[in-house]
Image (spheres, rainbow, N blue to C red):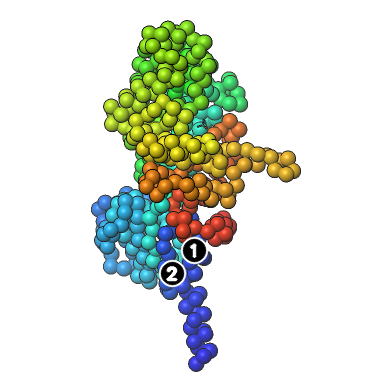
Amino acid sequence: MKKTLIAATLIAATLAAPAAELKLIPWPAKVTPQTGQFTLNEQTVVTADAPFTNEAALLAGELHLKCAATANENQIRLTTRGAEGLGEEAYRLEVDPQGATIHAQSPAGAFYGCQTLRQLLKTEAHTLPQVKIEDAPQFAWRGFMLDVSRHFFDQPTLLRLLDEMAGYKLNRFHIHLTDDQGWRLAIGKYPELTQTGARGNYSDQNAPPRFFTKAEMQEIVRYAAQRHIVVVPEIDMPGHAHAAARAFPKLGGGANTLNPASEATYDFLQNVLLEVMDIFPSPWIHVGGDEVNAGAWNKNAEVAKEMQAKGFADTQQLRKAFMQRMARFIEEHGRTTAVWHEALATEPDPQTVIFLWRPIQAALKKALATGHPVVLTPAEPFYFSARAKDAAGNQTFRNTLEAVYRGTSLLTNVPPAQFKQILGLQACVWTEHIGSVPELDNAIMPRLAALAETAWTPDAVRNFAQFQARLKSSANQ
Ligand code: ACM
C-alpha cells in the first residue's frame, strides 16, 4: 500500500512539470502546474475568435498547424471568452489533455499567450504540460533601441531582431535613424539626404550609401505591428545631425548641429517629420535633443543675430525655442514627442516622454516632479554596447547579465504616487564599435532575455538564479 502511494506520487511528480522546469522567459506572473499533458498531432488545429485571427495565423504558421473555424477538442483555442477583467496585454493560458486555451481581451494579450505556448513546446516538442498560467506585464514599455547610423543594419536583420523581441514579449523598437555618421531613411522630398547623407559609417567615411527605402521601412513597421511591436522612429536634432548638414551644408549650425536661427532648418525638419509620420504610425516621435553643442552656436553669426532679434541672453533660450517648436509641430499632427533627458532643460510640455540615459537619479526626480512619463534606459545597466576590459585585458561588455536583471533597483526611491509615470524599461545598442551581425548578436544576447524578464515579470516573482537556470536550459534545446 505504502509502496503504491509512493509510486503514484512519483508518477504525479513526473507528469506535473515542476514550475521551475518550464523554460519560460519572461517568467509569468502566476504559474500553476498540474498533472497531465496535451500532445499535439497532425490533426491539432488552431481556432480563434474573430479579433484574434492574425495571432492564430501566426501561431499556426510557426507550429505548422492548420487554422479551423471551430473544433470540439484537439485544438489550441484563442478566445475572448472567460477573459473578463484581464488587462490590455494580459492572458490566461490553460492546458488540459484535450487542448490549450488562451483567454485574452485584446489581440496583444492573445499574442503573448501564444509566445508562452511556443516556449512550452520548445521544452518538449509536440507536448504541452498541463498548466494554468495567468500573466500580465509589469511595465507597458518594454523596449529595445538600435542605432543604425554609426553602422547600418539591413531589413532582414531587423526582421529577425523583431522576431526575437516578440518571442520575449518586448513591444517597442526604437530606431535611431540619423546621426553624424549617416542618415538612414529615404525622404522623398530630399533625395540628397540619402545620396550624400547615407554615405559612410563610423568605420569608413567612404562606405557606399546604406539606408532604408520607404517601402523597406513600411515592411518593417508592418511586420513589427503584426507582432505587437511599435517601431518608434528617432530623428536626432538639433545635435547629432552632421549627416543632414553634409547633405545640406546651409542647414549646418556648426559642429554637428543644425542651424536654429534659419527658417530653412524648420522647413526642412518639418517636411522630414511629415514623411516620417507617414511611414511610422507610432504614437511617439523621438526627436533626440541630446548632447547639443551650444559652443558651436556661440560662434555662429546668424545665431548671434537671431538671439539679438529675439532678446535671448544665451543659446539655452534658443535651444528651448527650437525644441518647443518641433514638439508643437509633432503634437499638432496628433503624436507625442519623445526626447532624451537633456531636453528637460528646454522645459518640454508635461506629456513629452523623457528617455533617461545617464546617471539618472537627478533627471528622474526632475522628470517625475514635472509630470512627464519616463522610459528608463540608463547607460548602466541598459546600454548593451557599453564596453569594458576584463581582468585579463580583453574587451567585454560593461553591463553584466545580472546588472541588467537588477535594473529596476534604480526605481527604489520613486514615490508610489509617481510610479505610474514610469512607462517602462529599454535597452540601447549604439553601434560605433558594432559593425557586423555577429557583433550585434553578441551584444544583444542573452542580455535581451534579462531585460525582457525585468520589464515583464513583477519584481516579487523574479529570481536571478532561476532565470539563469531557465536561460541555460533553453539555450541547450
Ligand atoms: C545618448 O546616449 N546620447 C542618448
The reply to whether the residue tagged 1 has its Cβ within 8 angstroms of ligand 1 is no
From the viewer's side, name the closer residue of 121 and 254.
254
Q: In the rendered image, is residue 159 in sight?
A: no
| Image location of residue 151, percent across then percent down | 55, 30
**Rendering quarter of residue 91:** bottom left
Q: Amino acid at mark 2?
A: Pro
Q: Is residue 131 left or right of residue 278?
A: right
Please tell me whether mark 2 sits on a helix, a strand or a loop: strand
Instruction: Report the front residue among 41 and 429.
Output: 429
- Residue at numbered disc 1: 22
Where residue 385 appears, as percent x and y from the top left, is 57, 38
Dot 2, crowdedness within 10 Å: few (<14), some or many (≥20)? many
Dot 1: element: loop
Residue at the disc numbered 2: 33
Residue 371 visible to an observer of this rendering? yes
Labelled pair 2, 1 in contact (Cβ < 8 Å) = yes
The image position of residue 117, as x and y in percent, is: 41, 59
